[in-house]
Image (spheres, helix red, strand yellow):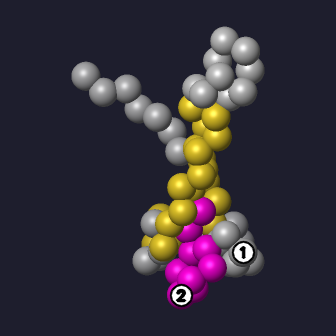
Amino acid sequence: MTYTDEETQEEKQMKAKVRVTPYFSYQPGNKGELIAAKVTGCENTEYIHASTASINTAIVEEERE
């Protein structure tokens, strides 16, 4: 997983365990539509979501031909 260090603005890499969290719409007409997804990554722990050192980022969907 690649990320930018907030203090130094350096691009860094980590060997992270990753958890993907999808978010779905419950609005009438769009019910069940995937509207966003988030990735949480953290290294050296079994508790990805609860870690204070975890990194959260959005997933961007790319169109493919």
On the image, the x and y values in percent for residue 48 come to 61, 74
Quadrant of the image occupied by residue 19: bottom right
Q: Quick one: label 1 or label 2, which is nearer the N terminus?
A: 2
To which residue does mark 1 refer? 50
Q: Which residues are magenta?
A: 40-48
Q: For numbered disc 2, what is the local secondary structure?
A: loop
Task: Work out whether 54 lies above or below 65.
Answer: below
Q: Residue furthest bottom?
A: 44
To which residue does mark 2 refer? 44
Main structural element of the magenta stretch: helix, strand or loop? loop
On the image, the x and y values in percent for residue 35 come to 61, 31
Task: Work out whether 29 lies above or below 24.
Answer: above
Q: Residue at x 66, y 12 (%)?
A: 29
Can residue 3 be seen by looking at this rendering? no
Q: Residue at x 68, y 28 (%)?
A: 25
Is the residue under label 2 in contact with that under label 1 (CB below 8 Å)? no
